[in-house]
Image (tube, rainbow, N blue to C red):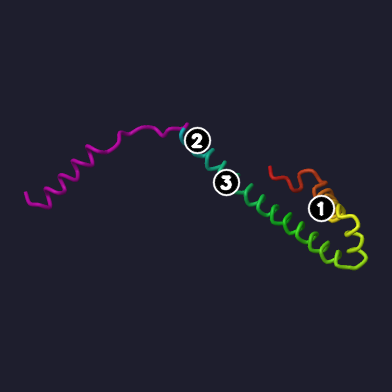
C-alpha cells in the first residue's frame, strides 16, 4: 500500500468510528428552537416599534418645549412667567398631557404589545 491508500483507509476508519449514531430528530428540541426564534423575532419587532414611538415622543416634547421657549420670549408672556414661575413648568406639561390624550386615546393604536 502506498501513502494515499493508507490515508484514505485511515479517513474511512475515522469516519466510521467517529460518526454519531443514527437517530430520529428530537421533536421537543426542534419545537424549542422554533419557539426561541419566534420569540426573538417578536422581541425584535417590539424593540423597533418602541424605538420609533420613543423617538416620536421625544420629538414631540422637544417641539413643545421649543415652542414654549420661543413664546416665553414675548414681553407679555415673559412678565407673566416672571410673576408666577410655576406656570413655566405647568404649561408645557399640560400641553404634553393633552398631546398624549389625543394621540393615545385610541386603545391599541400605539400599543407596544
Which of discs 2 and 1 lies nearer the camera? The answer is 1
**Residue 81 figure quarter:** bottom right
Q: Residue 29, image x and y in percent?
A: 46, 34
Query: Left or right: where does residue 16 sit relative to residue 52?
Result: left
Question: Which residue is nearer to you in this view: 7 or 33?
Answer: 33
Secondary structure under badge 2? helix
Question: Which residue is nearer to you in this view: 90 or 59?
Answer: 90
Query: Left or right: where does residue 45 sit relative to residue 32?
Result: right
Q: Residue at x 88, y 64 (%)?
A: 78
Query: Left or right: where does residue 90 sit relative to residue 32?
Result: right
Marks 2,1: beta carbons within 8 A: no
To which residue does mark 1 refer?
Answer: 96
Q: Residue 92, image x and y in percent?
A: 83, 55
To which residue does mark 3 refer?
Answer: 41
What is the C-alpha distance between the residues marked 1 and 3?
33 Å
Q: What range is drawn magenta here?
A: 1-28
Q: Residue at x 22, y 39 (%)?
A: 16
First in sequence: mark 1 vs mark 3: 3
To which residue does mark 2 refer?
Answer: 32
* Magenta stretch: includes residue 29: no
* Magenta stretch: includes residue 16: yes
Amino acid at each position: 500500500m502506498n501513502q494515499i491508500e493508507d490515508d484514505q483507509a485511515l479517513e474511512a476508519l475515522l469516519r466510521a468510528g467517529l460518526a454519531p449514531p443514527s437517530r430520529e430528530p428530537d421533536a421537543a428540541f426542534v419545537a424549542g428552537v422554533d419557539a426561541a426564534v419566534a420569540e426573538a423575532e417578536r422581541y425584535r419587532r417590539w424593540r423597533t416599534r418602541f424605538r420609533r414611538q420613543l423617538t416620536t415622543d421625544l420629538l414631540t416634547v422637544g417641539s413643545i418645549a421649543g415652542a414654549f421657549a420661543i413664546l416665553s420670549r414675548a414681553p407679555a408672556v415673559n412678565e407673566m412667567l416672571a410673576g408666577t414661575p410655576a406656570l413655566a413648568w405647568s404649561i408645557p406639561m399640560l400641553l404634553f398631557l393633552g398631546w398624549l390624550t389625543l394621540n393615545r386615546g385610541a386603545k391599541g393604536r400605539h400599543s407596544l404589545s
